[in-house]
Each structure stands twice: as C-alpha cells, then as structure tokens.
Amino acid sequence: MAKMNDIKPFEKRLYLASPTMHGEELQFVKEAIETNWVSTVGENINRLEEMVAEYVGVKHAVALASGTSALHLSMKLAGGKLNPGAKPGQALKGMKVFCSDLTFDASVNPVLYEDGEPVFIDTERDTWNMDPAALEKAFEMYPDVKLVVLAHLYGVPAKMDEIVDICRRHKALIIEDAAEALGASYEGARVSGKCGTFGDYIAVSFNGNKIVTGSTGGMFLTNDGNDADKARKWSTQSREDAPWYQHEELGYNYRMSNIDAGIARGNMLHISEHIAQKKAIYERYREGLRALPVSVNPYDDRTEPNFWLTCMLIDEASMCKQVRGEKEYLYIKEKGKTCPHEILEALASINAEGRPIWKPMHMQPIYRTHGFVTCDGYGRARSNAYIDEGDIPDTGADIFNRGLCLPSDNKMTPDQQEKVIDTVRRCFE
C-alpha cells in the first residue's frame, strides 16, 4: 500500500454515500407517530406515491418495502403477460430473460424468484451500461426471448434510443431497474424523459445510500392502472375485497411503512439539491484527477445523470499486477502504477470509504453457468475472474478489474475531497 503516514485520517468516517436529513423528514415521521399511523397505510405513503409519480412523469406509483420488491412484482407482472396461467413462483418458468451484466445482483435475483433463466448482456464503455450491439446479438442467438431487465448503473442512463428500438422490434418487454438513477434523465431522438419512464415495469430504490432515502424502501412505477392495482394487492398479501381476510392468490408482505415513507417524503423535497451536490463532487474529481492516468465513469451526451456515485478507471498501462480469487486478492506494488485494492486500502487508512465496481453477474458463482453474450456472440470463454497480463476480457470484467467507486457523500467538503484526491495521487508514486 502507498505510504500515507503524513496524511492525517479523517476524525469522522467519510462514507461512500450516506443519508442526508433536512428536517422535514422528522416532521412527517412525528406526524405519523402522533396520529398513530405507523403501519403500512397513511398520509406519508399516499403523498410519497403522488410526489414520485409526478416527479418522474408516470401515472401510478406503489410504495414498497424495497427496490427488490418492486423488481419482483415487475417480474410477476411481465411473466403473467408472457406466460398466462403460470403457477405461483413460476411466472417466468421456461423463459430466458436478458439482463444487465454489470449491476448489483438485486437486479437479477427476482428472475430466479419466478423460475426464469437470466442470460447476461455485456457492457459498453460509453456509459458502462447494457451494450445495444450485444443485445442485438443476443436476440439473434435467442430469438424467442421476450423480456429484458435493464439497470442504469451508478445513476448514469443507458442508451435508451437504441435499447428501446431493439426491444420493440423484437416485441420484448422492458423491466427498468432505476434503483440507482432516480432523477437522471435521457433526451434522445426516439425516447426522452427521466429514468423510470422507459420500461413497461419500473423499480426505484430508497435504500440508505441512494439519492433519496427512506432509510429503506422502494417503489413500483407504471402507466398502467391495472398493473398498479395488481402490484398494490400482491404487496399486501393479496387480500381480496371482502369483510374478512380472503385470499385467492399468492401475496407478499411488501408494503412500505408510513414511517419510512415519511423519511422518503421529506427527503424527496431535496432531490434537486442532492443531485447538484453529487454533480459538483463528480466535476471536482474529474478535474482533480485529470493529471493522473485514470478516467471517471463516463456518460452519453444525450443524458443527464444523477451522479449518485463517482467511479474511476485506471488506465490499463498504469495497472500494477494483481490477481483476484473468490474472496481474496493480491497485488504487487510497482512504481508509477497502482490497482483498485491499493487505492481502497489507502482510502481506508485515512478513514474514507470506497468500494470495488460491481462484480459482473456472469462472473458470480451463483450465475456462472448462465448464458453471457458480447457484441461478438457467446462470450463466456473470454471472461476471466483472474485476468492476467495479455488477456482480453469482456468489457464488464475489464471495468471491474480496473475500476473502483470513490467516496461520493454529498456532505463531503471540497477540502475533504482534495484529501481523497491526494491519497489517490500518492498511490501512483
């Protein structure tokens, strides 16, 4: 690890991204407690659903316990449309589903919840999102697929003009995982709007580190009132409209609490402020790291990200030798070179939090036997969890190999950020 002995650690930990409270959150939670509306119904839930639907630009929003809940209900709805009459928990049975590869596994796990089979689509370098060319190749290889799960990575919108066009030509539904991208927008020639308006079924997250938080929670978004009604019913154990507890189909305990909704409701009032703060952090990193052999996570000029996390990619020629096992890693320090783990260790030494880029799904042990498609076709043979000198990995594996997420907390001061930049700079000495 680079010597950081003369850099004084932060007294309080500098987080990757932590919740930011403003006061209204406490007011709304207090009102819920004082009026005794602390369960899964109440004014905070109603108002939050209205606020998010209006902000994003959709007709309906259903507040849920998590973004994963929203993704699961999206899978059920999509499966019900594509596979009518399927048994509970088997809405996607016998169906392959194209999924973003470079993402958190919550994007993909709900495919398994409904007995589907994920097939992973490689990443493109312009936005680090699903590669439209690889998606087109995947439809050539698997022409019967009718469902695509797309994630907007780190708050950067994917290439929606191309992806929506491909999916519509192949008559495929889109589940849009906008968990990281609330407030981001895309202005293309074919489609435009905020993330959360491009899919047939949409999920957002209010997890503690997101751009807007309820401490936990998520939301299902749609323009279809029937789908919203189904999601709302399923999320409350599928209780029928009867004078007693009547259940005729499988349900789930997925509803958001009125307490969590109060926090998210108050936080939602400050989304523009949070995005502006995150963008300023991104710009300071881009400028402060300019002299180093690195780049920050890119975005397409048709997009305006929410800049949730700023990430960096080390130039290939400036990577020191490293090897990664399943849970451990090794690297050899070389003058003028570094690697993600050396930088992460250096950040930890000054009490700052960073983390690796998401490990691609096709490299995960749970999904290693599933299909994986690059723009050249079946890409499994090119993937390598242990990338050696001279290897040409797929794009997602390469970004994972050379990238890391930098501290991006919106409460970070310019002086604190400069200390982080200096810490990164010293790793190249």
Image: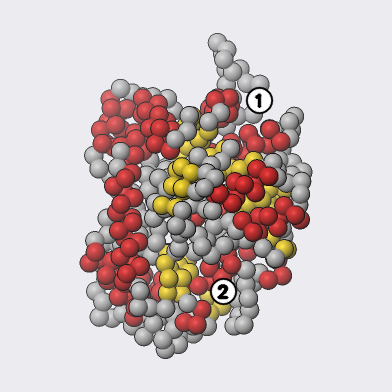
In the image, taking residue 381 as reference, residue 65 lies left or right, namely: left
Report helix, strand or loop for mark 2: strand
Regarding residue 345, the answer to whether it shows in the image is yes
Q: Residue at x 47, y 58 (%)?
A: 300
Q: Point out residue 423 in the picture as x, y percentages from the top left corner.
A: 32, 75
Is the Cβ of the residue at disc 2 closer than 8 Å to that at disc 1?
no
Number of marks: 2
Q: Point out residue 104 in the picture as x, y percentages from the top left corner.
A: 53, 54
Quarter assignment of residue 80? top right
- How busy is the neighbourhood of tag 1: few (under 14 within 10 Å), some, or many (20 plus)? few
Residue furthest to the bottom in view is 335
Q: Nearer the viewer, residue 67 or 145?
A: 145
Q: Residue at x 44, y 47 (%)?
A: 185
In the image, taking residue 62 as reference, residue 409 lies left or right, namely: left
Which quadrant does the C terminus fall into? bottom left
Q: Residue at x 31, y 60 (%)?
A: 281
Q: Point out residue 301 in the picture as x, y percentages from the top left corner.
A: 44, 57
Q: Residue at x 30, y 42 (%)?
A: 270
Vertical placement of residue 419 versus 92, above or below: below
Quarter assignment of residue 49? top left
Indicate which disc residue 324 carries: 2
Looking at the picture, which amino acid does disc 1 mark?
Glu
User: How far, Cα to Cα, is label 2 from label 1?
Assistant: 46 Å
- How busy is the neighbourhood of tag 2: few (under 14 within 10 Å), some, or many (20 plus)? few
Quarter assignment of residue 92? top right
Residue at image mark 1 = 249
Which quadrant does the N terminus fall into? bottom left
